[in-house]
Image: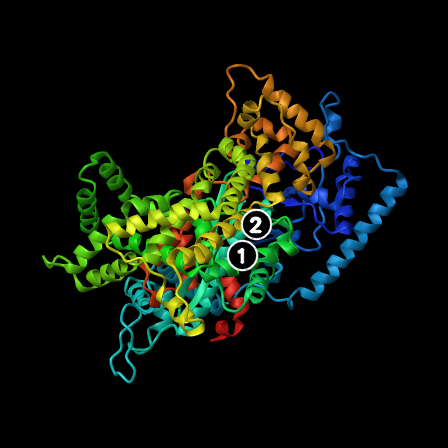
């Protein structure tokens, strides 16, 4: 959406000019001066927040001394800048023109006061310039900049730093470890140069005069750039790349927070952070912003997260409209507590599932039971194991053929499934039950290794997986998950479907909870069927039915009583799993979350499916404070419905939020436009364009391709965001400000 200049008789807009456009300041006093100088009577009754949000002035209305160009990508105003250059008379030459921006006629008293204010401002500016200007010299009249010219030595230092930063950017984008693949041994007289050192020497040999002059007198085996300086420059590089992304997010105002599974970096565990937002072209994006150390309890982690987002990144958590945490095991419970604490402080940061994770997988990961977590970790191991080689997949397909000889159709279906990431699907547990016998046969065959086809690492991994699969607790847990989560399978699939499916899914939650509560009320009957299925499956694989060994040891020590497997698994598996699934659904589909999803009826195709008989006003209060003109919302919604109800037959109804936001006429409905943009950021809604969700895939690729001891938080950010523009001059400026002593060396 282009920015239009608010100045009278100025027709410039951002899409037709390279000029910078500046928001009206939020400071009420400064904002009043801007309005007075504009002479726009219609702006006087607006608040500074409204002016800051909706009105801009182009750079042509400011003195050159008021504008700072800190880099090719950044043009900013000085803190005291006030616009003074306006054309207030050209419209008089054409009395028949439509003058939309009415110029206020000033009285003599108002003109006198304005002149006095301008005179005072001019005097202050002159005094400030005198205080800041350097002593007069022969070149002082030739330089009109506020900053003194750089000396030759300073220019050389800046050029040298630019060369170093350029090398770091290349290393990051190409995912080259800084220290190389061999480490220097302690007390060794040999020296193996790091990758950074090797690239630096290559540039010197290739003709980089700046680096050659810097190091031509140094010994060959001297480390040109110490590791501490490399670390400092890496951090600066990371912060500058992140700032490019954060600048976009701040301009778009609203965002949602998404975290992924913890990863190990430099011996510590970190939480990957993503931010979702709708950019200036109305595209929903999910960008990787960095890693957060995840030591400590829930309280410490929450405070660290808020400190990072608000203090370090400069975002306002009051503008956070959603949060989703993709985690498993013990950490899933930890992140759920973090989500609750965030919602206590920021109720609008609605806790939701993430669109990139199937709901059933999300629910199973959140179950804090050892048996369930063993199933989830084993499914991940199975997926990683068969992705190592096509030969391993061929071995599994051979095992499927053996078990499904009499049902070729089912065999073909399962083989096709195994060629995809089936462990992440909505029906993953149902597929696992179908494949369990084939998986066990395949693992036993690989471990047996009669033909010596597999190496020791492969056979060992196959043995460990087969030991887990051949345990009755694994079998019965898998069967219980398959049956308990069958009630949420269609519901979860609809959540990741089309907008119309998501809208109706929000209304079907009551029926899903009703079914699960019915299961809980009759758990003895359901468990009997589930347990019988598990026994039959175990019998075909010759797995003995028994209570877990650890539990038996505890019971024998405490009571000395014999426990029946059916009773044990009912009390410690079926009942807790169903109860926890019900509670988890209630937590992630709160009242505010459901209200937001029901507002998808603003999308024309949903409206049409409902015969244009919608009432968004009942749910619109959730985002009322985010709208530009909330008082006119009912009338605007009525006009929005009428527009689509009485459209011509040639016009089709937009089916997604993205399609709706791309319509030029949607901007004539400012409340609907703002409503859809805020709603779009919810993490539960899928990204319409897969290219805007590529950051998560790049993170996974980085983690897969990079050994743990070579991972770096800063290099990971550079690698994942390799397409984000970078400004070497800005990096140098930032580095010199942070480490001024380095410039003097």
Q: Position of residue 345 (x, y in %)?
A: 65, 56
Which residue of the protein is positioned furthest toward the front in this rendering?
A: 561
Marked residue nearer the N-terminal end (2 or 1): 1
Which residue is labeled 1 in the image?
336
Is residue 287 something that shows in the picture? yes
Q: Is residue 424 left or right of residue 312?
A: left
Q: Position of residue 72 (x, y in %)?
A: 51, 51
Q: Is residue 470 left or right of residue 561?
A: left
Q: Secondary structure at mark 1?
A: helix
Which residue sits at x=37%, y=44%? 425
**Front-lying residue, 596 or 141:** 596
Which residue of the protein is positioned furthest toward the right in this rendering?
A: 109
Q: Is residue 703 above or below residue 628?
A: below
* Disc 2 and disc 1 in contact, CB within 8 angstroms: yes
Q: Which mark is residue 294?
A: none
**Quarter of the figure with the N terminus:** top right
Which residue of the protein is positioned furthest toward the left in this rendering?
A: 451
Is residue 238 something that shows in the picture? no
Picture quadrant where residue 147 is located: bottom right
Q: Which mark is residue 587?
A: 2
Q: Secondary structure at mark 2?
A: helix
**Front-lying residue, 522 or 397:** 522
């Amino acid at each position: 959406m282009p920015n239009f200049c608010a100045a009278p008789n100025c027709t410039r807009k951002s899409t037709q000019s390279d000029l910078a456009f500046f928001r009206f300041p939020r400071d009420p006093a400064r904002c009043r001066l801007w309005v007075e100088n504009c002479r726009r009577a219609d702006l006087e009754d607006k608040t500074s927040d409204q002016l800051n949000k909706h009105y801009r002035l182009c750079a042509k209305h400011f003195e050159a001394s008021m504008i700072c160009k800190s880099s090719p990508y950044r043009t900013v105003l000085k803190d005291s800048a006030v616009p003074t250059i306006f054309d207030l008379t050209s419209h008089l030459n054409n009395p028949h023109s439509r003058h939309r921006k009415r110029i206020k006629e000033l009285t003599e008293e108002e003109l006198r006061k304005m002149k006095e204010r301008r005179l005072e401002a001019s005097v202050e500016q002159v005094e400030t310039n005198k205080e800041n200007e350097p002593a007069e010299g022969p070149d002082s009249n030739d330089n009109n900049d506020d900053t003194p010219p750089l000396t030759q030595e300073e220019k050389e230092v800046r050029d040298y730093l630019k060369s170093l930063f350029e090398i770091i950017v290349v290393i990051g984008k190409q995912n080259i470890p800084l220290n190389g693949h061999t480490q220097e041994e302690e007390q060794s007289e040999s020296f193996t140069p790091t990758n950074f050192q090797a690239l630096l020497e290559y540039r010197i040999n290739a003709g980089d005069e700046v680096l050659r002059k810097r190091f031509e007198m140094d010994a060959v085996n001297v480390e040109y750039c110490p590791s501490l300086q490399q670390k400092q420059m890496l951090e600066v590089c990371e912060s500058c790349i992140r700032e490019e992304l954060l600048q976009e997010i701040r301009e778009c105002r609203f965002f949602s927070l998404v975290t992924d599974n913890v990863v190990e970096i430099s011996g510590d565990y970190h939480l990957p952070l993503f931010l979702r937002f709708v950019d200036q072209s109305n595209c929903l994006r999910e960008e990787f912003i960095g890693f957060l150390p995840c030591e400590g309890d829930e309280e410490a982690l929450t405070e660290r997260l808020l400190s990072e987002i608000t203090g370090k990144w400069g975002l306002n958590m009051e503008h956070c409209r959603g949060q989703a945490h993709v985690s498993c095991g013990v950490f899933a419970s930890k992140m759920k507590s973090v989500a609750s604490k965030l919602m206590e402080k920021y109720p609008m940061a609605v806790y939701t599932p993430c669109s990139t994770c199937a709901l059933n997988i999300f629910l199973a990961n959140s179950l804090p039971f050892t048996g369930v977590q063993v199933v989830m970790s084993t499914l991940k191991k199975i997926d990683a194991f068969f992705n190592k080689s096509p030969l391993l997949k061929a071995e599994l397909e051979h095992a499927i053929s053996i078990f499904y000889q009499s049902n070729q159709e089912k065999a073909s279906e399962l083989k096709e499934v195994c060629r995809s990431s089936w462990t992440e699907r909505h029906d993953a547990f149902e597929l696992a039950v179908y494949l369990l016998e084939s998986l066990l046969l395949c693992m036993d065959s690989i471990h047996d290794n009669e033909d010596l086809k597999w190496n020791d690492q492969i056979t060992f991994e196959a043995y460990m997986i087969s030991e887990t699969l051949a345990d009755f607790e694994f079998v019965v847990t898998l069967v219980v998950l398959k049956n308990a989560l069958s009630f949420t399978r269609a519901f979860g699939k609809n959540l990741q479907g089309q907008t119309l499916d998501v809208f109706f899914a929000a209304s079907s939650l009551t029926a899903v909870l009703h079914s699960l509560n019915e299961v809980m009320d009759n758990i003895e009957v359901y468990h009997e069927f589930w347990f019988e299925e598990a026994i039959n499956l175990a019998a075909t694989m010759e797995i003995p039915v028994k209570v877990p060994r650890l539990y038996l040891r505890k019971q024998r020590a405490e009571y000395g009583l014999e426990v029946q497997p059916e009773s044990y698994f009912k009390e410690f598996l079926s009942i807790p799993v169903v109860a926890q699934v019900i509670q988890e659904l209630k937590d992630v589909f709160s009242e505010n979350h459901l209200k937001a999803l029901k507002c998808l009826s603003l999308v024309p195709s949903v409206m049409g499916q409902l015969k244009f008989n919608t009432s968004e006003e009942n749910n619109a209060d959730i985002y009322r404070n985010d709208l530009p003109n909330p008082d006119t919302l009912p009338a605007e919604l009525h006009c929005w419905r009428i527009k689509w109800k009485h459209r011509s037959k040639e016009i089709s109804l937009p089916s997604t939020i993205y399609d709706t936001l791309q319509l030029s006429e949607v901007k004539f409905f400012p409340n609907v436009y703002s409503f859809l943009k805020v709603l779009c950021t919810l993490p539960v809604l899928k990204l319409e364009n897969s290219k805007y969700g590529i950051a998560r895939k790049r993170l996974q690729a980085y983690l897969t391709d990079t050994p743990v001891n070579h991972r770096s938080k800063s290099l990971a950010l550079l690698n994942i965001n390799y397409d984000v523009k970078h400004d070497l001059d800005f990096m140098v400026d930032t580095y010199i400000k942070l480490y001024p002593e380095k410039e003097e060396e």
